[in-house]
Amino acid sequence: MEPIIEHPWNLSETDAIKLQQQLATKVSKIDQLNHVRYVAGVDVAYSEHSDRLIAAVAVLDASTLELVEAVIAEDVVQFPYIPGLFSFRELPPIVKALKGLATAPDLIVCDGQGLAHPRRFGLASHLGVLFDVPTIGCGKTKLLGDAQEPDAARGSVAPMLDQDEVIGHVLRTQHNIKPIYVSIGHRISVRTACDWILQLTPHYRLPETTRQADQLVRKALTIAKNSAL
């Protein structure tokens, strides 16, 4: 899997913001999905004792949610910790991992934001535009915006607003469980994004894509830590 857009990652804060603003114009907010056979989750973990990052991509069968392929990639931090610019810090190892896939996903779910971002270009949108693949932002916490709590039932939603613009939905994935924050990444509508997240959360709060990718990076971090001892 290869990106259709490539750019440098070690930019100044000003240049990174300008690039976000340029690439944000390429985000598609409508459904442009083909048949989704494979869906992937991506996650990044930080080493506690070095500047290393470990990224994981977990590709699942969209019907059975069984793991089809997993790829781990390592990198070093190339960008400082600046709120609103996390994609410049976390995407380089994710891009490496995606390049190593033999099974190209039809949809990617990111543990983070898409349109629900100050410049409407969070990590999910950045990744989607680079690879021109449908992506969903699915965050455990809210980055910005206002929203009411959805009803307690699974599948209940409430709009997430920023300056009167709907930037995502607050979605209850399990009955009476804390909701998650879903936003458009690229080539998908927010309604379809929520439908997919519900399909990917049959038993737990978080989608299986995120859970599988998280397990992969945790295991890789444990192995790396033990090998360093």
Image (tube, grey):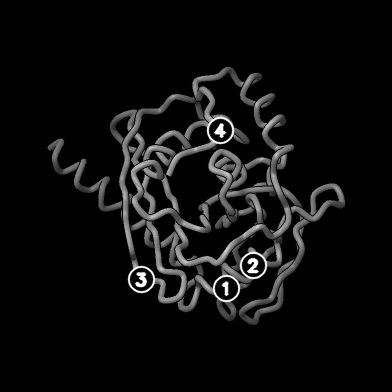
Between 69 and 11, the one nearer to me in the picture = 69
Q: Amino acid at mark 4?
A: Ile
Q: Residue at x 33, y 63 (%)?
A: 68
Tag 3: Cα neighbours inside 10 Å, few (<14), some, or many (≥20)?
some
Q: Amino acid at mark 3?
A: Glu
Find residue 198 and report its horizontal and vertical position in percent. Answer: 57, 73
Amino acid type indicated by mark 2:
Cys
Residue underneath mark 1: 198
Could you tell me if the residues under marks 3 and 4 are in contact, i.e. CB atoms within 8 Å? no
Q: Which residue is mark 3?
A: 66
Does 25 sit left or right of 107 as displayed?
A: right
Residue picked out by circle 2 = 194
Position of residue 16 relative to residue 46, above or below, is above
Which mark is on residue 5? 4
Label 1 neighbour load within 10 Å: few <14, some 14-19, many 20+: many
Rounded to the nearest whole Å, what is the CA distance between mark 4 and mark 2?
A: 27 Å
Comes first in the chain, label 1 or label 3: 3
